[in-house]
Image (cartoon, rainbow, N blue to C red):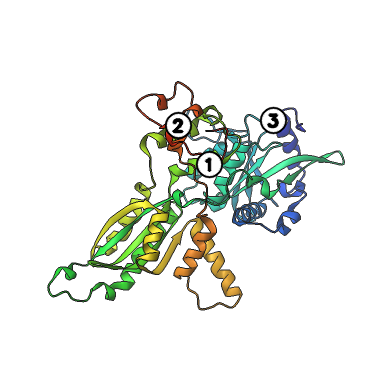
Amino acid sequence: MSIFTSEAKMQEWLENKLTSIDGLADIINNIESIKNYIPQNLSESKIKQSFLYCIESLYLNHSSTRNQNISSTKGESLNPDFLSYAPETESIVIIELKNQQGATREAGTELSAYASEIKSALSYISDGDIINVIISPVWPTLLKHHLYNDIFWQGKNTICLEPFTQENEILLKIIDIPLLVQADIPQKISEEHLGGYHICLYDDTLYQQPISETKLDQYMALIKASISSMSTKGEKMNTHGFSFLSEGYGLSPYFITIVNAAPFKSIERIFHSNDIKSYSDLPLIEQKILDTYLEYAPEGHGASLNSLCETASLMLENICKPRAEGFTSWDELKKHIQFNCKPIYFESWGIFKELTIEKLSYKYKNGSYNIELNDVNLGFEVIDEIVDEYYNYVNLHLLSNSFFPKSHAVFNEDIYIDEDLIRSDFPDENIS
């Protein structure tokens, strides 16, 4: 049962509290326990980092707005519950209150809208200077799923607080970290969640007779710089991926394998939740994404991946003819470079880069000083930390027709699902 009868009452309580304290941290009672918490996996480590990062901006807060419209667009209404400034970290703190089970999922999208409006007013502000605070007595599955993705994949600085009573006083506590890492949703991703291809570097001189040695060996610095430029571009676009440079064969003595998280394939992860038993259990936006995936089957070879390729090609075109080939998922690309070629250089961006630096720092701390950031073995170690090769990937094209309402397009010619192909090992037997 909620402590407050309404969000208005929660707002009134927090307004009164903020007038008598220096910052929100003054009424959070378990900061030390979060600092001392030992993460059990990568997901928990990322959540802890986010919580601790946010806490540094909650010791001193100066209120800017309280439930006021911050939109600069006429006729549009954006009313964050509280907008504050943290002078110690020079950050903007957005506080959103939720007191209803049904409405809590909106909190994540509302915070994103407020952050976008702040960015339109402060041209140079980064995500690192925006702190998101959600205060709620309830944490339904879809809200937790949304927040986990925001923290782990989008790198947003978010902290989740819950009101409670202690000796007749209402205080706040940081929610338990494992609560956001839902037991019924896998912590790792599948190789199928990663899409990519090879950029083959064709050497024109090898067409000549007699065949000579490739000229590309002398341009290794340029090739590696082109790969580095992809990493920089990937970070700027807030994508997550990696690349390998490998020794090739024939007219392509080298090739670059680029791999990125396939955004539309991530919809599969929610189907591991026991809360999703039918199409109607999905929020509207996820219904539409599922419909799009079923009709068009996007595999992660879209604009962002092509942008990375084009960034590298601007340099590579000076020494060779780069050409994208072998469009597939990471499981097939990995087999090719491991068994048919020799990987010699690794680069990464997003969560893969974060983990690479973390693992390298650990190795240096333990005396392994001869390992470089672009070490191939380090790269495979990082990928193994994030990717589970035994992940039970749900092929959404094999969802049973019984999962959908009779009015859905699967019952028309637009999308056809063969009942004879339904997988027997679907993780939730209720959806089969």
Label 3: element kind: helix
In this view, the residue in front, 317 or 180, is 180
Q: Nearer the viewer, residue 166 or 78?
A: 166
Q: Type of residue at label 2?
A: Lys
From the image, which quarter does the N terminus lie in? top right
> For mark 3, does the 10 Å Cα neighbourhood hold few (<14), some (14 to 19), or many (20 or more) residues?
some
Question: Picture coordinates of residue 109 (x, y %)?
Answer: 54, 37
Asked where in the image residue 235 lies, by quadrant, the reply is: bottom left
| Mark linked to residue 288 | 2
Instruction: Name the kind of residue labelled 3 in the image.
Output: Glu
Residue 12 falls left or right of residue 308: right
From the image, tell me which residue sits under label 1: 425
- Which residue is tagged 3? 7
Relative height, residue 143 to residue 244 (above, below): above
Query: Which residue shows up at 38% across the image and 30% down it?
Result: 416
In primary-sequence order, the first of circles 2 and 3 is 3
